[in-house]
Image: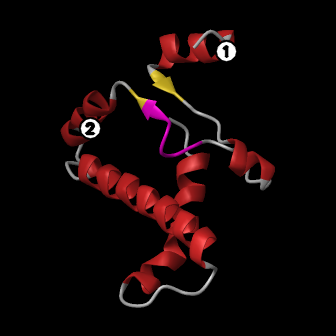
Amino acid sequence: MTEPVTTDTFALRALLWLLDRELAYSRHYPAVSWTGSFARDVDEVGRWHAGHGDPGWSLRRSRATALLAEADRLSSLAEIIGQSSPAGPRADGAAGWPVLREGYCRRTH
């Protein structure tokens, strides 16, 4: 991390937003990688939410992160085997992943 904006953002906000070249080329903005980006103080933020009436925040965040990782995995598989719809119960959940991605990328951390 030698780029000054990245270094300063990480020092001031304790987070790193990794940009994703494939998202940028597909004109998905902001092109923030939801799997490569992270925050150092997630546990602290979870404790704050728990202390202010939202004890389930950490669990919901973990589930959302897992869903985004699964969406990436399935997108990679779809590129390899084609765009056919997945069979079984996961087909129903696939419709919500783009909404979750947009919410993650637009949310102010």
Foreground residue among 3 and 29: 3
What's the CA distance linking mark 2 and mark 1? 26 Å
Q: Residues within 10 Å of mark 2 (few under 14, many from 20)?
A: some
**Residue 102: horizontal and vertical position, in percent?**
60, 57
Q: Image quarter for residue 18? A: top right
Which quadrant does the N terminus fall into?
Answer: top right
Vertically, is 13 above or below 47?
above
Q: Name the residue at 70% across, 49% down.
A: 22
| Residue type indicated by callout 2 | Gly
Task: Tell me the residue that label 1 is attached to.
Answer: 5
Q: Name the residue at 49% across, 10% down.
A: 11
Q: Image quarter for residue 41? A: top left
Foreground residue among 109 and 93: 93
**Residue 60: horizontal and vertical position, in percent?**
30, 55
Magenta span: 33-38
Q: Name the residue at 58% across, 66% down.
A: 98
Q: Name the residue at 51% across, 59% down.
A: 72
Does the magenta portion include 36?
yes
Foreground residue among 78 and 61: 78
Vertically, is 74 above or below 48?
below
Q: Secondary structure at mark 2?
A: helix
Task: Tell me the residue that label 2 is attached to.
Answer: 46
